[in-house]
Image (cartoon, rainbow, N blue to C red):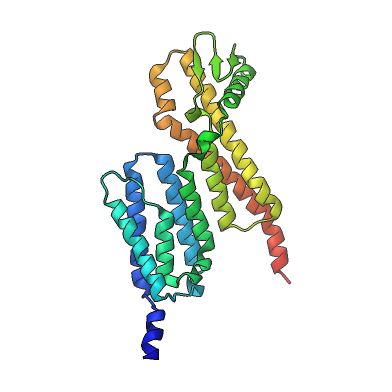
Amino acid sequence: MTKVVSNLRRLNIPAFWLLAIGVGLTVIHLSLLWQTKNPNILGMNLLYWLAICSLLWEKRRSLTLNSSLFSSFTGTVLITLVLLKSTSPFEQHVPPLMSAVGLGMLASGLRGLKQYWRELLLFLVLELSRQPFAQFIEISELTAKFAAYILWYLNFKVSSQGVNITLSRGSVEVFHGCSGMESIIFVLGLALLFLMLFPTRIRNIILIPIVAIFLGFIMNGFRVALLAVLVDLSSKETFKYWHQGDGSLIFSVVTTLIFGVFCWLLLQLDSPLNQDSVDP
Protein backbone atom coordinates (compact mmCIF):
# COMPACT_ATOMS: atom_id res chain seq x y z
CA MET A 1 0.00 0.00 0.00
CA THR A 2 2.82 2.38 0.90
CA LYS A 3 4.52 1.64 -2.42
CA VAL A 4 1.32 2.44 -4.35
CA VAL A 5 0.94 5.78 -2.55
CA SER A 6 4.59 6.58 -3.26
CA ASN A 7 4.12 5.83 -6.96
CA LEU A 8 1.08 8.10 -7.06
CA ARG A 9 3.03 10.91 -5.47
CA ARG A 10 5.79 10.58 -8.04
CA LEU A 11 4.77 10.39 -11.65
CA ASN A 12 7.50 10.22 -14.26
CA ILE A 13 6.13 11.11 -17.70
CA PRO A 14 8.41 9.93 -20.55
CA ALA A 15 10.48 12.71 -22.08
CA PHE A 16 9.14 11.83 -25.53
CA TRP A 17 5.58 12.70 -24.54
CA LEU A 18 6.70 15.89 -22.83
CA LEU A 19 8.52 16.88 -26.02
CA ALA A 20 5.47 16.05 -28.14
CA ILE A 21 3.20 18.16 -25.91
CA GLY A 22 5.69 21.03 -25.99
CA VAL A 23 5.95 20.96 -29.78
CA GLY A 24 2.17 20.87 -30.08
CA LEU A 25 1.72 23.88 -27.79
CA THR A 26 4.40 25.77 -29.71
CA VAL A 27 2.73 25.09 -33.06
CA ILE A 28 -0.66 26.19 -31.71
CA HIS A 29 0.75 29.42 -30.32
CA LEU A 30 2.66 30.37 -33.47
CA SER A 31 -0.18 29.40 -35.81
CA LEU A 32 -2.57 31.69 -33.94
CA LEU A 33 -0.03 34.50 -34.11
CA TRP A 34 0.32 33.90 -37.85
CA GLN A 35 -3.38 34.70 -38.23
CA THR A 36 -2.84 38.17 -36.75
CA LYS A 37 -0.73 39.07 -39.82
CA ASN A 38 1.57 41.15 -37.62
CA PRO A 39 5.16 40.29 -38.60
CA ASN A 40 6.66 42.18 -35.66
CA ILE A 41 4.73 40.18 -33.07
CA LEU A 42 5.28 36.90 -34.93
CA GLY A 43 9.00 37.57 -35.34
CA MET A 44 9.49 38.45 -31.68
CA ASN A 45 7.61 35.37 -30.49
CA LEU A 46 9.54 33.14 -32.88
CA LEU A 47 12.86 34.51 -31.59
CA TYR A 48 11.76 33.91 -28.01
CA TRP A 49 10.71 30.35 -28.76
CA LEU A 50 14.07 29.65 -30.39
CA ALA A 51 15.90 31.13 -27.41
CA ILE A 52 13.82 29.09 -24.96
CA CYS A 53 14.46 25.89 -26.91
CA SER A 54 18.17 26.70 -26.92
CA LEU A 55 18.20 27.20 -23.13
CA LEU A 56 16.37 23.92 -22.57
CA TRP A 57 18.68 22.05 -24.93
CA GLU A 58 21.78 23.28 -23.11
CA LYS A 59 20.61 21.90 -19.75
CA ARG A 60 18.68 18.88 -21.01
CA ARG A 61 20.95 16.40 -19.20
CA SER A 62 20.68 18.16 -15.84
CA LEU A 63 16.89 18.55 -15.72
CA THR A 64 14.99 16.69 -13.02
CA LEU A 65 11.87 15.13 -14.55
CA ASN A 66 9.90 14.04 -11.52
CA SER A 67 6.34 15.24 -10.95
CA SER A 68 3.62 14.45 -8.42
CA LEU A 69 -0.03 13.54 -8.81
CA PHE A 70 -1.17 17.01 -7.75
CA SER A 71 1.32 18.79 -10.02
CA SER A 72 0.50 16.55 -12.98
CA PHE A 73 -3.23 17.16 -12.49
CA THR A 74 -2.71 20.92 -12.24
CA GLY A 75 -0.47 20.93 -15.31
CA THR A 76 -3.04 18.92 -17.26
CA VAL A 77 -5.78 21.39 -16.31
CA LEU A 78 -3.68 24.36 -17.44
CA ILE A 79 -2.82 22.74 -20.77
CA THR A 80 -6.48 21.78 -21.27
CA LEU A 81 -7.51 25.40 -20.72
CA VAL A 82 -4.96 26.49 -23.31
CA LEU A 83 -6.31 23.97 -25.82
CA LEU A 84 -9.88 25.13 -25.19
CA LYS A 85 -8.88 28.76 -25.74
CA SER A 86 -7.12 27.83 -28.97
CA THR A 87 -10.30 26.28 -30.39
CA SER A 88 -12.38 29.40 -29.77
CA PRO A 89 -13.25 31.23 -33.03
CA PHE A 90 -12.98 34.55 -31.17
CA GLU A 91 -9.53 33.88 -29.70
CA GLN A 92 -6.31 34.63 -31.57
CA HIS A 93 -3.98 34.38 -28.60
CA VAL A 94 -3.21 31.65 -26.11
CA PRO A 95 -1.08 32.61 -23.10
CA PRO A 96 2.33 30.96 -23.59
CA LEU A 97 3.11 31.43 -19.90
CA MET A 98 0.15 29.23 -18.96
CA SER A 99 1.33 26.60 -21.42
CA ALA A 100 4.87 26.76 -20.03
CA VAL A 101 3.76 26.47 -16.40
CA GLY A 102 1.46 23.58 -17.24
CA LEU A 103 4.15 21.70 -19.14
CA GLY A 104 6.71 22.44 -16.43
CA MET A 105 4.44 21.03 -13.73
CA LEU A 106 3.84 17.93 -15.83
CA ALA A 107 7.57 17.45 -16.27
CA SER A 108 9.06 18.42 -12.92
CA GLY A 109 6.29 19.31 -10.50
CA LEU A 110 5.72 22.53 -8.62
CA ARG A 111 9.07 22.48 -6.86
CA GLY A 112 10.89 21.70 -10.08
CA LEU A 113 9.67 24.87 -11.80
CA LYS A 114 12.67 26.72 -10.41
CA GLN A 115 14.79 24.85 -13.00
CA TYR A 116 13.00 26.82 -15.70
CA TRP A 117 13.13 30.32 -14.22
CA ARG A 118 14.88 31.80 -17.26
CA GLU A 119 12.41 30.24 -19.68
CA LEU A 120 9.43 31.28 -17.54
CA LEU A 121 10.79 34.82 -17.35
CA LEU A 122 10.96 34.98 -21.14
CA PHE A 123 7.39 33.72 -21.39
CA LEU A 124 6.33 36.35 -18.85
CA VAL A 125 7.94 39.07 -20.97
CA LEU A 126 6.08 37.77 -24.02
CA GLU A 127 2.82 37.94 -22.10
CA LEU A 128 3.50 41.43 -20.77
CA SER A 129 4.44 42.67 -24.25
CA ARG A 130 0.82 42.12 -25.31
CA GLN A 131 -0.52 44.29 -22.51
CA PRO A 132 -1.25 47.98 -23.23
CA PHE A 133 1.40 49.33 -20.87
CA ALA A 134 2.96 51.36 -23.68
CA GLN A 135 -0.25 53.34 -24.07
CA PHE A 136 0.45 55.05 -20.76
CA ILE A 137 3.87 56.25 -21.94
CA GLU A 138 3.43 59.16 -24.34
CA ILE A 139 6.50 60.24 -26.31
CA SER A 140 4.81 61.42 -29.50
CA GLU A 141 5.83 65.05 -28.96
CA LEU A 142 9.42 64.07 -28.26
CA THR A 143 9.45 61.95 -31.42
CA ALA A 144 8.06 64.83 -33.47
CA LYS A 145 10.75 67.19 -32.18
CA PHE A 146 13.51 64.69 -32.89
CA ALA A 147 12.25 64.00 -36.42
CA ALA A 148 12.00 67.75 -37.05
CA TYR A 149 15.57 68.19 -35.82
CA ILE A 150 16.75 65.52 -38.28
CA LEU A 151 15.02 67.34 -41.14
CA TRP A 152 16.43 70.69 -40.01
CA TYR A 153 19.91 69.21 -39.91
CA LEU A 154 19.38 67.98 -43.49
CA ASN A 155 18.53 71.56 -44.58
CA PHE A 156 14.77 71.14 -44.83
CA LYS A 157 12.55 74.08 -43.96
CA VAL A 158 10.69 72.49 -41.08
CA SER A 159 8.91 73.50 -37.91
CA SER A 160 7.31 71.48 -35.15
CA GLN A 161 4.57 72.30 -32.70
CA GLY A 162 3.44 69.63 -30.29
CA VAL A 163 3.00 66.41 -32.25
CA ASN A 164 2.83 68.19 -35.64
CA ILE A 165 5.71 68.44 -38.11
CA THR A 166 5.23 71.08 -40.81
CA LEU A 167 7.19 71.34 -44.04
CA SER A 168 6.73 73.75 -46.92
CA ARG A 169 3.97 71.78 -48.69
CA GLY A 170 2.57 69.47 -46.07
CA SER A 171 2.49 68.40 -42.45
CA VAL A 172 2.19 65.19 -40.46
CA GLU A 173 0.87 64.44 -37.00
CA VAL A 174 2.75 61.89 -34.92
CA PHE A 175 0.15 59.68 -33.27
CA HIS A 176 0.92 57.31 -30.42
CA GLY A 177 1.25 54.36 -32.80
CA CYS A 178 4.11 56.12 -34.59
CA SER A 179 5.78 57.48 -31.46
CA GLY A 180 8.32 54.65 -31.37
CA MET A 181 7.18 52.81 -28.24
CA GLU A 182 6.55 49.65 -30.25
CA SER A 183 10.05 49.82 -31.70
CA ILE A 184 11.57 50.45 -28.26
CA ILE A 185 9.74 47.49 -26.73
CA PHE A 186 10.83 45.30 -29.65
CA VAL A 187 14.53 46.13 -29.20
CA LEU A 188 14.24 45.79 -25.41
CA GLY A 189 12.92 42.29 -26.03
CA LEU A 190 16.00 41.53 -28.10
CA ALA A 191 18.16 42.93 -25.30
CA LEU A 192 16.59 40.58 -22.77
CA LEU A 193 17.17 37.64 -25.10
CA PHE A 194 20.83 38.53 -25.39
CA LEU A 195 21.25 38.87 -21.63
CA MET A 196 19.59 35.51 -21.06
CA LEU A 197 21.59 33.65 -23.68
CA PHE A 198 24.97 35.31 -23.11
CA PRO A 199 25.90 36.12 -19.50
CA THR A 200 27.98 39.28 -19.46
CA ARG A 201 29.42 41.91 -17.16
CA ILE A 202 27.28 44.00 -14.84
CA ARG A 203 28.07 47.18 -16.75
CA ASN A 204 26.82 45.55 -19.96
CA ILE A 205 23.61 44.50 -18.21
CA ILE A 206 22.99 48.21 -17.66
CA LEU A 207 24.38 49.38 -21.00
CA ILE A 208 22.49 47.00 -23.30
CA PRO A 209 18.93 48.06 -22.32
CA ILE A 210 19.93 51.73 -22.53
CA VAL A 211 21.31 51.23 -26.05
CA ALA A 212 18.14 49.32 -26.97
CA ILE A 213 15.92 52.21 -25.88
CA PHE A 214 17.95 54.84 -27.71
CA LEU A 215 18.30 52.71 -30.85
CA GLY A 216 14.56 52.03 -31.05
CA PHE A 217 13.75 55.71 -30.57
CA ILE A 218 16.36 57.02 -33.01
CA MET A 219 15.48 54.60 -35.82
CA ASN A 220 11.80 55.43 -35.45
CA GLY A 221 12.69 59.13 -35.55
CA PHE A 222 14.35 58.63 -38.94
CA ARG A 223 11.27 56.76 -40.12
CA VAL A 224 8.96 59.61 -39.06
CA ALA A 225 11.26 62.12 -40.77
CA LEU A 226 11.09 60.09 -43.99
CA LEU A 227 7.30 59.97 -43.81
CA ALA A 228 7.17 63.73 -43.34
CA VAL A 229 9.27 64.24 -46.47
CA LEU A 230 7.01 61.91 -48.45
CA VAL A 231 3.96 63.90 -47.36
CA ASP A 232 5.72 67.09 -48.42
CA LEU A 233 6.37 65.52 -51.83
CA SER A 234 2.71 64.42 -52.09
CA SER A 235 3.81 60.85 -52.76
CA LYS A 236 0.82 58.94 -51.38
CA GLU A 237 1.74 55.49 -52.66
CA THR A 238 5.30 55.73 -51.38
CA PHE A 239 4.03 57.09 -48.07
CA LYS A 240 1.66 54.14 -47.74
CA TYR A 241 4.50 51.72 -48.50
CA TRP A 242 6.76 53.11 -45.78
CA HIS A 243 3.95 53.68 -43.30
CA GLN A 244 1.88 50.50 -43.51
CA GLY A 245 3.51 48.31 -46.15
CA ASP A 246 6.70 46.31 -46.31
CA GLY A 247 8.75 49.49 -46.02
CA SER A 248 7.89 49.75 -42.34
CA LEU A 249 9.47 46.32 -41.81
CA ILE A 250 12.74 47.49 -43.35
CA PHE A 251 13.33 49.78 -40.40
CA SER A 252 12.68 46.88 -38.01
CA VAL A 253 15.17 44.71 -39.89
CA VAL A 254 17.81 47.44 -39.95
CA THR A 255 17.27 48.12 -36.24
CA THR A 256 17.66 44.43 -35.47
CA LEU A 257 20.85 44.19 -37.52
CA ILE A 258 22.41 47.24 -35.85
CA PHE A 259 21.56 45.93 -32.40
CA GLY A 260 22.89 42.50 -33.36
CA VAL A 261 26.20 44.01 -34.47
CA PHE A 262 26.42 45.96 -31.21
CA CYS A 263 25.87 42.80 -29.15
CA TRP A 264 28.40 40.91 -31.27
CA LEU A 265 30.99 43.61 -30.62
CA LEU A 266 30.34 43.34 -26.89
CA LEU A 267 30.94 39.59 -27.08
CA GLN A 268 34.18 40.18 -28.96
CA LEU A 269 35.36 42.65 -26.33
CA ASP A 270 34.55 40.22 -23.52
CA SER A 271 36.02 37.12 -25.18
CA PRO A 272 39.73 37.88 -24.51
CA LEU A 273 38.98 38.27 -20.82
CA ASN A 274 37.01 35.04 -20.77
CA GLN A 275 39.87 33.18 -22.44
CA ASP A 276 42.37 34.61 -19.96
CA SER A 277 40.23 33.43 -17.07
CA VAL A 278 40.11 29.90 -18.49
CA ASP A 279 43.77 29.55 -19.48
CA PRO A 280 46.08 28.40 -16.65
Looking at the picture, tell me which residue is in the foreground, 129 or 226: 129
Residue at 40% in and 72% down: 70
Looking at the picture, tell me which residue is in the foreground, 107 or 186: 107
Residue at 58% in and 26% down: 143
Q: Quadrant of residue 262?
A: top right
For the C terminus, give its image quadrant.
bottom right
Question: How many numbered circles are shown?
Answer: 0
Q: Is residue 76 above or below residue 88?
A: below
* In the image, farthest residue toward the top: 168
Looking at the picture, tell me which residue is in the foreground, 233 or 213: 213
* In the image, farthest residue toward the front: 1
Residue at 38% in and 78% down: 11
Q: Is residue 232 above or below residue 59?
A: above
Looking at the picture, tell me which residue is in the foreground, 257 or 115: 115
Q: Is residue 81 above or below residue 227?
A: below
Residue at 60% in and 50% down: 264
Residue 103 x, y percent position in the rendering: 40, 65
For the N terminus, give its image quadrant.
bottom left
Q: In the figure, is residue 273 to the left or right of 237?
A: right
Residue 213 x, y percent position in the rendering: 60, 39
Residue 64 x, y percent position in the rendering: 48, 75
Residue 142 x, y percent position in the rendering: 60, 26
Q: In the figure, is residue 88 to the left or right of 199?
A: left
